[in-house]
Image (spheres, rainbow, N blue to C red):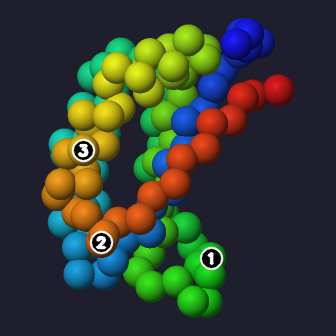
Amino acid sequence: MVYKIGMVLYNITVNVAPAVESDWVGWMRQIHIPEVMATGKFYEYRFLKMLSEHPDAEGNTYAIQYLAKDMNDLDVYLSQMAPALQKKHTDRYGENCLAFRTVLEEI
C-alpha cells in the first residue's frame, strides 16, 4: 500500500463507565499515554473529553489523539507495539471502556 507522506493522526475514542472513570483518567495520564509516547512512533498527543454526548450514552467519552510523522511509523506501531498496550488496557478495564479507532491524514 502506498501512502502520501504527511502528518497522520491516530484517534482513539473511548466511552468510559462512571465506576472506573477516575481511575481510568489517572491511569491514562500516568501510565498508558507515557507508554505509547515512549514507543517513539508519535511526536505529540492530545487527551480530550467530549463535552457533547449522545443522549443514550452512559458515562463520559474521551478522545486520545496521537500524531505520527507518517503512515510508516503508525503501521509499525499498530503491528508491533499496539497489541500489547491494548491488551493491558483491556485486562485492566474490560467492558468498562469501549473504544474505536480511526486514522486521519492532514491534507
Q: Amino acid at mark 2?
A: Asn
Residue annotated with mark 1: 52
What residue do we see at 24% from left, 34% from top?
Answer: 84
User: Viewer-proximal residue, 34 or 79?
Assistant: 79
Residue 87, disc: 3
The quadrant of the rendering that contains the C terminus is top right
Q: Earlier in the sequence, mark 3 or mark 2?
A: 3
Q: Quadrant of residue 21?
A: bottom left
Q: Amino acid at mark 1?
A: Ser
For marks 2 and 1, give the CA distance: 20 Å
The quadrant of the rendering that contains the N terminus is top right
Query: Disc 3 or disc 1, which is closer to the eye?
Result: 3
Q: Is residue 12 above or below residue 68?
A: below
Assign a secondary structure to mark 3: helix
What residue do we see at 75% from left, 28% from top?
Answer: 106
Q: Earlier in the sequence, mark 2 or mark 1?
A: 1
Give the crowd class for mark 3: few <14, some 14-19, many >=20 residues within 10 Å: few
- Res. 24 in view: yes
Q: Earlier in the sequence, mark 3 or mark 1?
A: 1
Which residue is farthest right? 107
Q: Do the CB atoms of the residues marked 3 and 2 lie less than 8 Å apart?
A: no
Q: Quadrant of residue 80?
A: top left
Query: Disc 2 or disc 1, which is closer to the eye?
Result: 2
User: Viewer-proximal residue, 32 or 98?
Assistant: 98
- Horizontal side of 11 relative to 82 (left or right) equals right
Residue annotated with mark 2: 96
Q: Position of residue 69 (x, y in %)?
A: 58, 15
What residue do we see at 33% from left, 77% from top?
Answer: 17
